[in-house]
Amino acid sequence: MSFQAPTREATRQVPWTPQDDVLLVRAAQTGDPVSFDLLYRRHARIVHGVLIGRATREDVEDLVQEVFLTAWRQLATLRDPAAFGGWVVTIARHLRIDHGRRQRPQQSLEASPEPQSDADALHRLEAQRALAAIRELPAAYRDTLTLRLVEGLTGPEIASRTGLGPDSVRVNLCRGMKLLRQVLTSPAARTR
Amino acid sequence: MDDMDEMDEMDDEYLWRRIGTPAEDVARLEALLGRFAAAPAEQWPPLALPAVRPAAEAHVPGVTWLAAAALLLLSVGAAWLGPRADTPGDPWRVARVEGAPTMAAAPLTRYSRVVPGRWLETDAASTAVMFVGRIGRLEVAPGSRLRLVTASPGDHRAELERGTISAQIWAPPGQFVLDTPSATAIDLGCAYTLTVDQHGVGLITVEGGWVGFEHEGREAFIPAGATGRTYPGRGPGTPTYADATPALRAAVDVLDQAGTSGSQADALDIVLREARRQDALTLWHLVVRVDVTLRPLVVDRLSTLVPMPPGVTRAGILAGDRAMLDTWWSALGLGTADWWRTWRQKWNPSR
């Protein structure tokens, strides 16, 4: 069976720079909730991508809210408004670590709805196995791959929105993909 | 180059930019893992922020938010449970919130896709919500007439003939443009409420971010906390902050509609007397709007509030030097003029 790469969210063709956040961050720092809500909607996807690398989908929705509520409370401490994207990603990573400590070890990865067919069930199983394999990778590769393969961001977008250098992102994507292939084709993965 | 290197290079480029042909396993992983992706931004539930500035939140009627929140819950459920197929282009969708809105004169009874050119109308008892592709949301108030003009990635355009919309756009600047009978509003990443009355006069109140207004070269930049009017045949008026004195705001309305030096003088006197530091926003716009004989008064008052930066001269400003005006604007602390010009250029390359 061959798969066609999905064409996702075409708005990403439009350049997005951290400078676009500056006025909104400044307004939010004065207490403007509308501007902060706009920031939340701009950056929720990337925060989601960072969190899905560790937490279940059900938990991720709550954690995204927690990340932005934390950011709202601490917004006055952000000195460079253009660094907002990387800053919320850092908050997300800290919360993800805390969440990982609280999570029970045997908790299932995903609580999915009942599959509608055998093919659907197989796809769900395979998707969960792929996500589980990504979750086993070192953090730098894991985050980059979830943002790329789950959220559909390009490498330059990942760099721009996380504050990472483009070279680092590119290396992480390349090495992470190699590692992921190794994990997915290992005998242990095949018998999972 | 051996086979492995060729494979790596192909992988690398596709992984990096999503350009070219993906390796089969990468395409498969993207297709499989897309099911775990975040829902589109407009479907995220609102943040329950602690109230810090209740006055700022009071612009949006509570009942409308409640209705929109209910709709959002429905759409979130649909997005998570349904197949996450990506749609070509960036379609708009519309849903009834209250009453009986119509689309192309037919009752709007369910959540549906918006077809360009068809008018959405709400009567005195109707409201609706339109989702602007994946980049924002418009709440359509009673008594409104609105239509979608174009909807393509990075280029969403609509026309508001009359009525009121509350827009919330979370895309980067310049992706959403709204035409009214008297001016074009270009969104610069923001939230605002825009009303067009039966005479085509527009009133915009910006709640977050920025809006740029333009009509035949006459432009206005309106930041959060400010309002601006537009007039048929004249284009955008002069923006004022909502917390400026009522006398200043009334005088600006007079100035915007006065045609001669004599009829402008009294109103300008009030504006100059009432202006605070933050009202430099208003004075900067007035520099090129008042009669040329009154211009020195505005320039001198503005320079006491915000001194001219290096490279800007009184003579240059009085002569209407665009570069100097932009440099002075950048000294107001409201963002740089380059920023706006970049986005205007993208939106309207002819200027």
Image (spheres, grey):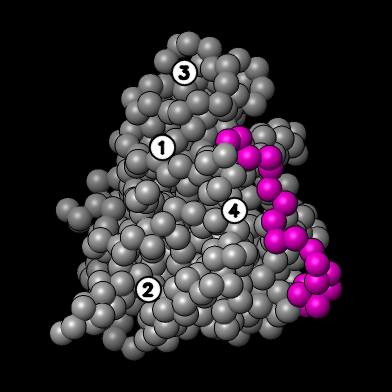
Mark pair 2, 1: CA separation: 26 Å
Mark pair 2, 3: CA separation: 40 Å
Local crowd size for mark 1, using a 10 Å CA cut-off: few (<14), some (14–19), many (≥20) = some
Residue that badge 1 annotates: B91
Q: Chain of mark 3?
A: B
Residue closest to the eye, B141 or B137: B137
Residue B103: image tag: 3
**Residue type at tag 3:** Met
Check disc 3 and report its element: helix, strand or loop.
strand
- Residue occupying the point 33% across, 25% down: B117
Residue A157 lies, with reference to residue B60, above or below; the image says: below
Q: Are marks 2 and 3 on the same chain?
A: no
Q: Chain of mark 1?
A: B
Magenta residues span: A98-117
Residue A125: image tag: 4
Q: Chain of mark 4?
A: A
Mark pair 4, 1: CA separation: 31 Å
Residue closest to the eye, B219 or A161: A161
Q: Is residue B253 visible?
A: no
Mark pair 4, 3: CA separation: 43 Å
Check disc 2 and report its element: helix, strand or loop.
helix
Residue that badge 2 annotates: A156
Q: Which mark lies nearer to you, 2 or 4?
A: 4
State left or right for residue B295 relative to residue A124.
left
Q: Earlier in the sequence, mark 1 or mark 3?
A: 1
**Residue type at tag 2:** Pro
Check disc 4 and report its element: helix, strand or loop.
helix
Q: Chain of mark 2?
A: A
**Residue type at tag 4:** Leu
Q: Which mark lies nearer to you, 4 or 3?
A: 4
